[in-house]
Image: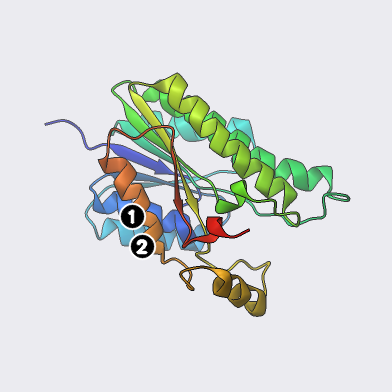
Amino acid sequence: MSPQPLALVTGAAHRLGKAFVLSLARKGYAILLHYRTSDAQAIDTATEIRTLDVPVFLSQADLSEPKNILSMFAMVDKIPHPLKVLVNSAAVFPAGDPRTLSVKDWDAALDLNLRAPFLCSQEAAKRMTNGGLVINVTDIGAQKTWSHFPSYTVSKAGLEALTRILARALAPSIRVNAIAPGLVLQSDLLTNEEWHRLIERLPLKRAASLEEIASALDFLVMNEYVTGQTLVIDGGYSLLG
């Protein structure tokens, strides 16, 4: 019997990352759950995964530091399950004015949202010797001009370009795709009034559920003829001017 495959999900303690990691656990993958600072939530999510009777391992790391990415993948090498799926979900969402945004806030977004997925994908590819799947979590904002979130928007647009580049470079054994959610969970940066105003502009007039976003991951895992694509799950947000 072949060993149970491993899925590594970054930023998986809560919010969208948790939805992705639970979806993979339900499919029977052993799980490496990465988190940065959400210790209690990571432990709670791991406990929930164990009820599904699949192995789960925890990795705490600041992925904006390349050395920590190497340490996380050194842990992958010690886990007795072959790496088959990588989901690059960890991200930061700094606000700022393009005229005054600090170098620190620019680098924070690009280092975690774009460089870390690139380095994680490099390391994953070295270990996916029998094939695998990389999923980058982007944002519908990658296709917009969100002037209040310049570094975030640029990082996600870059991640969509990186998805296409890696899909071509790593084929045929490794597929690389992206998921671009629209409005799902309210950000701390938005007031309730702003959040509801955005939802009312949507053609479908509601935010997505976590399950609806996670179902995009289910599709990309199942359909082995899809690579280099960004799957948009946005309730029609991309239709707006």
Q: Which residue is drawn at 31% across and 38% down?
A: 6
Residue placed farthest to the right in the image?
100
- Look at the picture and state if 207 lies above or below 11: below
Residue receiving disc 2: 211
Does the residue at mark 2 contact the one at mark 1 (Cβ under 8 Å)? yes
Task: Quarter of the image for the N terminus: give it.
Answer: top left
Residue 184 position, x and y percent, is: 50, 64
Residue at x-position 44% and y-position 27%: 167
Residue 151 sits above or below residue 48 on the image: above
Disc 2 is placed on an element classified as helix
Which of the 4 image quarters holds residue 117?
top right
Q: Which amino acid does label 2 sit on?
A: Glu
Tell me the kind of residue under disc 1. Answer: Ser
Q: Is residue 101 left or right of residue 183?
A: right
Estimate the x, y position of residue 181 in percent, counting from the top left: 49, 55
- Please state the horizontal and vertical placement of residue 28, each as a whole percent of the image: 23, 47
Q: Quadrant of residue 43?
A: bottom left
Task: State the mark number for residue 13.
Answer: none
Residue 13 at least partly seen? no
Residue under pointer 1: 215
Q: Answer whether residue 26 is visible to the viewer in this image.
A: yes
Judged from this view, the residue extending furthest toward the bottom is 193
In the shown orientation, is residue 106 left or right of residue 180? right
Instruction: Kindly give the residue lying farthest to the left in the view shown.
Output: 1
Q: Position of residue 218 (x, y in %)?
A: 30, 49
Q: How busy is the neighbourhood of tag 2: few (under 14 within 10 Å), some, or many (20 plus)?
A: few
**Colour setup of the view:** rainbow
Element carrying mark 1:
helix
Q: How far apart are marks 2 and 1 (CA)?
A: 6 Å
- Residue sitting at x 70%, y 54%: 146
